[in-house]
Amino acid sequence: MSEVLFFVAGLGAIGGALGVVSLRNAFYSVLALAFHLVSLAALFLLLRAEFVAAAQVIVYAGAVMVLYVFVVAYVGGMEPMLAGGSGRGLKFVSLFFAVCLFAELCIALTTRYQPMFTPRLPGGAARQPPRPGCRSPPGARRGVSAGDHRRRRR
């Protein structure tokens, strides 16, 4: 059941976000934003973050969206659009940037994470990552505790 709710809320969030940027009527765009925020709250509920979901609905989908609706109602949509026409060159530039962004996301998702630096111990030696299946730190003598080692020296 949670998988179905996840996909419904995820599709609702994506659909609401697409509606915000694609709808020409500002009032419908604000309603799509409210739908997007409610879908995000549902995703927060699936993550068991009830407080964040409640804050999302009360603060953003409630108070901020009421302000947006008042601004849209007050300003209205009777003025001509400020943006110029989208020429053929602008469409090619936007397509180029979309392809570059998609390639960057593919590279980021398919490469393994490599840390930028290796943490150092106080003596200057590099800290070795723990070996799989090994409970003792690398370089430690197995089966001998620190107290046993001191007793043998005497």
Image (cartoon, rainbow, N blue to C red):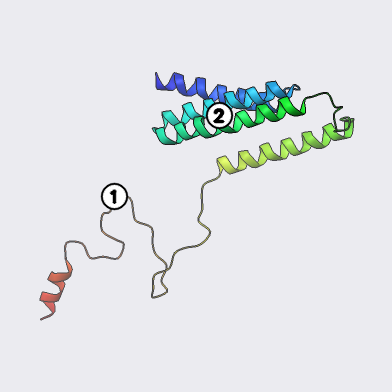
Residue drawn where x is 64% and y is 31% of the image: 67
- The tag on residue 64 is none
Q: Quickly name the residue at label 2.
A: 61
Residue drawn where x is 50% and y is 31% of the image: 58
Q: Position of residue 42 (x, y in %)?
A: 47, 26
Q: Is residue 51 left or right of residue 29?
A: left
Above or below, 2 against 137 in this view is above
Q: Position of residue 52 (x, y in %)?
A: 45, 36
Badge 2 or badge 1: first in the primary sequence = 2
- Mark 1 packing: few (<14 Cα in 10 Å), some, or many (20+)? few
- The tag on residue 133 is 1
Q: Is residue 56 left or right of residue 125?
A: right
Amino acid type, label 2: Ala
Distance CA(mark 2)–CA(mark 1): 48 Å
Location of the C terminus by quadrant is: bottom left
Q: Position of residue 33 (x, y in %)?
A: 62, 27
Helix, strand or loop for disc 2: helix
Helix, strand or loop for disc 1: loop
Q: Nearer the viewer, mark 2 or mark 1?
A: 2
Q: Is residue 104 left or right of residue 112?
A: right
Amino acid type, label 1: Gly
- Toward which corner of the image does residue 65 lie, by quadrant? top right
Q: Nearer the viewer, residue 150 or 60?
A: 60
Residue drawn where x is 73% and y is 35% of the image: 98
Q: Nearer the viewer, residue 79 or 108?
A: 79
Location of the N terminus by quadrant is: top left
- Toward which corner of the image does residue 107 lie, by quadrant? top right
Q: Is residue 1 left or right of residue 40?
A: left
Residue at the bottom extreme of this rendering: 154
Q: Are the residues tagged 2 and 1 within 8 Å (C-beta)?
A: no
